Amino acid sequence: MKVAIVDFGCGNTGSVKLAFERFGVTAAVTAAADEIAGAERVVLPGVGAAGFAMQNIDRLGLRGPLTSLKQKALGICLGMQLLFERSEEAGVECLGIVAGGIRALTPSPGRPVPHMGWSSVQVHDPKLGLLDGDYVYFAHSYAADPGPATVATAEYGRNIAAVVRQGNWLGAQFHPERSGEAGARFLKAFLQ
């Protein structure tokens, strides 16, 4: 299987590539629109700020190619946030694949921001490869509220979308490549 990991200068591409290699899948890390379009699966990883990420996506000419993908695609962490219409972080317009926006998490006693650590997920779709109550690893300061595209949620000061699905796109707010056995099940389900 040909997997393309989009290299837009904000990704945790190395750890995502390694996660797929554990399944015997060699993933290409690329910013080439034709290579992305020709892959059987596409991954939009992400670590960093939404504004900078969207500037890079636009500078590389990837907005159109990403929004026109027909094959299964996965946004991870910031990559999931970029699937939404907008982010409160720098007030940036994102890819617009998923309706709604991303807003900041609010710190409270015992719940620092960024949210960095393990939280359980409530799964609303058994095809995700996740089980209700699985613990997965999060590292983020912004999140989406649950909406029509939400297929798994987590609690961190408020109910947040942990996984969204819109058409061929899947988005994970958590890092499946760092989430042990539960994350491996999630990535295997994405490859199938």
Image (cartoon, grey):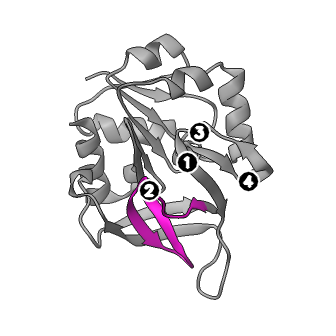
Q: Earlier in the sequence, mark 1 or mark 2?
A: 1
Mark 3 vs mark 4: give the one in front.
3
Q: Going by the image, does 135 lie left or right of 157? A: left
Assess whether residue 139 is covered by the magenta stretch: no
Residue holding disc 3: 96
Q: Quote the CA–CA distance across marks 1 and 2.
A: 9 Å
Q: Are marks 1 and 2 in contact (CB under 8 Å)?
A: yes
Farthest residue in the top direction?
34
SS label for mark 4: helix
Q: Identify residue type, mark 3.
A: Gly
Q: Quote the CA–CA distance across marks 1 and 3.
A: 7 Å
From the viewer's side, name the closer residue of 76 and 91. Answer: 91
Residue holding disc 1: 99
Assess whether residue 151 is covered by the magenta stretch: yes
In the image, what residue occupies the spot 65% across and 28% down?
57
From the viewer's side, name the closer residue of 93 and 36. Answer: 93
Q: Quote the CA–CA distance across marks 1 and 4.
A: 17 Å
Q: Identify residue type, mark 2.
A: Pro
The dominant secondary structure in magenta is strand
